[in-house]
Image (cartoon, rainbow, N blue to C red):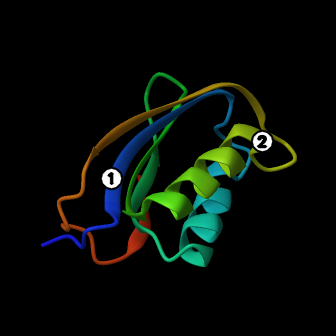
Amino acid sequence: MAAKNESRAKIRIRGTVQGVGFRYFVLQRAQECRLKGYTMNLPTGEVEVVVEGDKVFIEDLYKAVQRGPSKAKVTEATIQWEAAKGTFRTFEIKR
């Protein structure tokens, strides 16, 4: 069961975001914010992040992915809020 201040978000990032260390950048930021979930490359060339934790920290992560690591060029980032499900134990990179 998720705590009261817990939220869940699905973030999609478009641009030059694959092959530039983007998922590792997300992993590091998510761990710093004690968030749980995953990030993965999509066949469309986008990166997806599904994350749960304190809404304030998710918002911080969202701001960070809008910039990305130095070699990335983010053209668009979207966030979709959902109710936390409490299904994640850690934050990981998939694929």
Residue 41, horizontal then vertical, whole percent: 48, 41
Q: Earlier in the sequence, mark 1 or mark 2?
A: 1
Most foreground residue, 21 or 54: 54
Q: Based on the displayed image, in which of its 4 quarters is residue 91 positioned? A: bottom left
Q: Is residue 11 left or right of residue 4?
A: right
What quarter of the picture does the N terminus occupy?
bottom left
Residue 80, horizontal then vertical, whole percent: 38, 34
User: In what element is the residue under mark 1?
Assistant: strand
Looking at the rendered image, the disc whose residue lies closer to the viewer, 1 or 2, is: 1
Above or below residue 34? Residue 79 is above
Q: Residue at x 54, y 63 (%)?
A: 57
Q: Is residue 94 visible?
A: no
Residue 15, horizontal then vertical, whole percent: 68, 24
Q: Which residue is drawn at 20% across and 70% down?
A: 2
Q: Is residue 61 left or right of residue 74?
A: left
Residue 87, horizontal then vertical, whole percent: 18, 66
The amino acid type, in three-letter code, at marker 2 is Arg
Most foreground residue, 16 or 32: 32
Q: Residue at x 34, y 66 (%)?
A: 5
Q: Based on the displayed image, in which of its 4 quarters is residue 26 positioned? A: bottom right
Q: Residue at x 78, y 38 (%)?
A: 72
Cα gap from disc 1 to disc 2, whole angstroms: 21 Å
How crowded is the residue under tag 2: few (<14 C-alpha within 10 Å), some, or many (20+)? some
User: In what element is the residue under mark 2?
Assistant: helix
Give the residue pinned by disc 2. 67
The amino acid type, in three-letter code, at marker 1 is Arg
Q: Which mark is residue 8?
A: 1
Q: Is residue 86 left or right of residue 26?
A: left
